[in-house]
Each structure stands twice: as structure tokens, then as C-alpha cells.
Amino acid sequence: MIPEKRVLMKRSLPFLLIGLLIFIAYLYFFVDINEMIAIVKGINLFYYSLAVGVLLLNTVFFSLAWQYLLRPLSVNVPFRKTFLFDLIGSFVDILVPAESISGDVSKVYLMSKGSGENAGKVVASIVSHRILSMIITLSSLIIGSTSLFIMQYKLPSFVLNLILLVVIGIMMSLVFMFLICSKEQLTQKIIDSLLRFFNFVLRGRLKLTSLRSKARKALRVFHQSMEFLGGNPRSLVWPVIFSVVAWILSILLSFLVFVSLDHPVSFSVVIIVYSIGCTIQTIPLGIPAEVGPVEIVMISLYALLGVPAGISAAATVLVRIITVWFKLFLGFVAFQWVGIKTLTGGSR
């Protein structure tokens, strides 16, 4: 595990630097860097520390939502493991330029290995968790936009079009995911196509017969698990509550950063920018954590929504320090801990 981690970081570093260079170039040409630095120097450390604490709480509640999706499926593991695996998933997501895929795959592997349960159950819990997150993001965009409309705040046409584009994209993704969850034959065809593709890329090195057999078994368990969760709405109550709390904490984090700069902004503005930023971050653009493009979009959106450019840039940088770099550090520590426990035979 340790050598794989080093290779992962070594391969991701050049792409990460590219993203940072793009962001620095944007700041140089479109933002007064001296003004931004002066604003950052005047930060209120008390409120910024609160924002860091909110991130930790957000991670706890996000992991709790996953934990309470695993329980009804009889995947019984201590919350400590769920929390660590979630941090590692975030760590992999940040480093591997395939956001929304790489982290989930690592979580499936770790949880299946750590619990001894069929991977289909774990996949069902993660897919359900992602569907919940997408529905909450979609709802937050609608709520944030509606609240600004009620307050008679005229949204710039670019922002309005971007919101509509993101809403349509999320709705299409949800329809696709619901089809995957309900149509076993469709999912089987997709998996078979992917296996044939990877076998072609690897020049026939895959054991297709064995892999197809394992995939079908896991797929059967996956659909059974999804049917169970869908047929037992009570089992979704706590995951929904924990997911909503995690989302509220995410919004609060950004709000506290603006407060730390002595420039509080409307919750509706934060909701819109945060929701669009999260959606863009799930698009695999080839840059770890989408560093560069996400910051540029966030700064631009805040500026279009009436926040001064210097404040927008300073707040975005400070938010991303917490949500990317600090989270990367936490994931690295979790990666180290799980690696050490595995190497010493204490993974169970």
C-alpha cells in the first residue's frame, strides 16, 4: 500500500501543478493580487478556525450518512472504519483526476475488504449516498435561486444559464442512475461492454469468464440491496438527516470564511456558488481536485453576484485551503494509518 501511495502522489503532482499554474495566471490577469493578499492578512483567525472545525463536523456527518446506509444491508463495521475509509476516498478523489469515480472505487474496495461483505452491498450504499447528495445539491440550487428571486435580486444571465445547465445535468445524471439501479439487464450490458473494452486495452490479459461471473454475482446483490433500501423508506430517514446536516455545514463553512474576512454574504449566494462548484468538481477534467477551474468559476460567480473581486478571490482561496488541502492532509493521515494497520496485520 505504501509504494502505491507514493506512485499515486508522484503521478498526480504534475497535473496538480498545471491546475495551480492556471489559477495563478487567472489571478495575475483578472484579480488585484496585492489587494487579495492584504485582505487575507486581515483575516479573523477565530472565525476561520471555526470554519476548519465545521469541515471536521461535515466529514463526520457525511460518514454517518454512509454508515446508516450500510447498516440496513447488514454491513456491520465500526464507525471508525467508515470514517477512515471516507477520508481515504476523499484523498484518492483529490489526487486522481477522475473525481466522483476513483474515490468511490477505493471506498468499495476498502469497505468490502474490511467488512468481508459482498461488494454489491457496498456499491448499493455508495450509489444511494451519491443519489442523496445529488438530490440535495439539486434542491439547494433551486432553493437558493428561488430565494434570490423572492428578494427581487436579478441574477445575471450567465449565472442563470449556468444554473439551468447544472440543474439539467444533475437531473439527467439522476435519471441514468435510477435506470442503473432498476434495470439489471441494462447494467449487465454496460458492465460487459466495459470489461470487453478494458480487455481490448490490456490486450486480452483479463480473465473475462471469471470477471463476468464475479460481476454478475455482485450485480445481483447490488440490485437486491437497492430494492431493499427502496422498499424500506424508514431505513433512509437517518441517512437523509445526516446528509442534509452535512450539506448545511458545507454552506456554513463558506459563510464563516466570508465572516472571517469581515464581509458576510447572503446564504443564497453561497448556496448557488457552492452547489455549482461541487457539480463542476465531479467532472473529470484531468486535474486533481479540479484545482484551477473550480477556483476560477467560484471567484467569477461570486463577483457576478455582487461580491467585490478581492473578497471573492481571498474567500475562494481560503475555502479551498480547507476543503482541498486540509482535507488532503486528513486523507493522507488516514491513508497512513490504514496502511500501517494493514502491514501489521491489524486491518480487521
Image: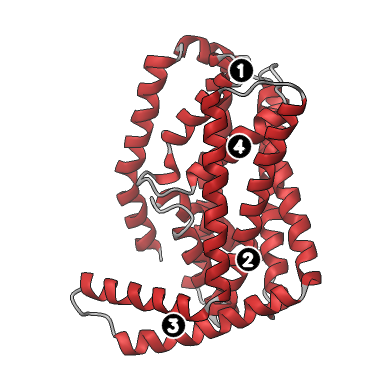
Per the image, the residue denoted by label 2 is 128
Which amino acid lies under the numbered mark 2 shown in the image of this protein? Ser
| C-alpha gap between disc 2 and disc 1 | 36 Å
Q: Position of residue 239 (x, y in %)?
A: 74, 62
Q: Is residue 217 above or below residue 242?
A: below
Q: Earlier in the sequence, mark 2 or mark 1?
A: 2
| C-alpha gap between disc 2 and disc 3 | 19 Å
Quadrant assignment, res 254: top right
Q: Earlier in the sequence, mark 2 or mark 3?
A: 2
Q: Position of residue 264 (x, y in %)?
A: 71, 21
User: Tag 4: Cα neighbours inside 10 Å, few (<14), some, or many (≥20)?
Assistant: many
Q: Position of residue 284 (x, y in %)?
A: 40, 49
Q: Is residue 133 above or below residue 82?
A: above
Q: Element at badge 1?
A: loop
What is the count of numbered marks?
4
Q: Earlier in the sequence, mark 4 or mark 3?
A: 3
User: Tag 2: Cα neighbours inside 10 Å, few (<14), some, or many (≥20)?
Assistant: many
Q: Nearer the viewer, residue 239 or 81?
A: 239
Per the image, the residue denoted by label 1 is 307
Query: Can residue 238 be seen by looking at this rendering?
Result: yes
Q: Element at badge 3?
A: helix
Which amino acid lies under the numbered mark 1 shown in the image of this protein? Val
Q: Quadrant of the C terminus?
A: bottom right
Q: Is residue 336 above or below residue 315?
A: below
